[in-house]
Image (tube, helix red, strand yellow):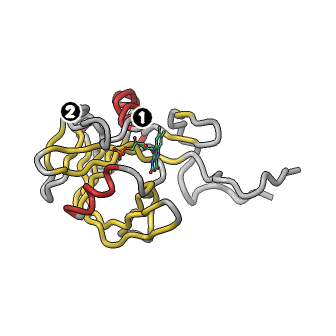
Amino acid sequence: MKKNLGAQLALYPTPLTVIGAMNGEKPTWTLVAHVGIIGHDRLLVSLSSAHFINGVIKKTNRLSINMVSEAILPQADYVGSVSGNQIDKSDVFDYETGERGTPMIKDSPLSIECEVEDIYKTEGFESFIVKFSGTYVDENDITDEGKINYRTMKPVLFEFPTYEYLRTGDVIGKCLSLKKGK
Ligand SMILES: Cc1cc2nc3c(=O)[nH]c(=O)nc-3n(C[C@H](O)[C@H](O)[C@H](O)COP(=O)(O)O)c2cc1C
């Protein structure tokens, strides 16, 4: 039996990311778990309208999405606890600049350079619809076949209801190879 808990944000866990954008000469960073995939060529980054980074993103129309691994979780957690409106977060991560000028966290295993295509507004939120142009992956997390290896990368996951970080689990099967149940 399932109990109906009413209208709840319940679609978890989600991957945890740090969004980066250039604020003039300096980067700024914000922790964001509400990210998604639209079709096969666009991503979505959902940001509260009050955040500092929104205005920064709008200046250049570019942002980077940086996957959070366990190694950078403490710094990632920090950039989710303070706002660039009050505190300069530019030196929290070492970064390199991508081909399109976005700041990419050196210690993040996967960084995606994105260009903003549209902003979908809902009450209190701006969801940035972005197209990606570059996917920068740590060489240690690329298989011999040239694929991204999420087993070694171990992206950190997030869930809202208990506000916790989760470790990525084990592989339980190859897609489209499982026998139909009953
Ligand atoms: C685990 C975690 C996940 C978060 N996910 C989001 C998110 O998906 N969208 C969002 O707008 N804020 C999210 N936040 C809140 C922002 O990271 C936080 O308010 C940050 O200080 C805003 O920084 P800024 O004002 O410099 O942009 C999250 C915070 C935490 C701790």
The residue drawn where x is 24% and y is 56% is 113
Element marked by disc 2: loop
Q: Where residue 139 sits in the image (x, y, percent)?
A: 23, 40
Which residue does the numbered mark 1 point to in the structure image? 81
Q: CA distance from mark 2 to mark 1?
A: 15 Å
Q: Where residue 120 sits in the image (x, y, percent)?
A: 44, 70
Three-letter amino acid code at the position of disc 2: Asp
Of residues 123 and 67, the one nearer the viewer is 123
Q: Where residue 175 sits in the image (x, y, percent)?
A: 54, 56
Which residue does the numbered mark 2 point to in the structure image? 91
Q: Residues within 10 Å of mark 2 (few under 14, many from 20)?
A: few
The residue drawn where x is 42% and y is 34% is 81
- The quarter in which the C terminus is drawn is bottom right
Of residues 157 and 57, the one nearer the viewer is 57
Mark 1 close to ligand 1, CB under 8 Å: yes
Q: Which circle's residue, 2 or 1, is located before the other in the chain?
A: 1
Q: Residue 149, can we see it? A: no
Relative to residue 153, is residue 1 depicted above or below?
below
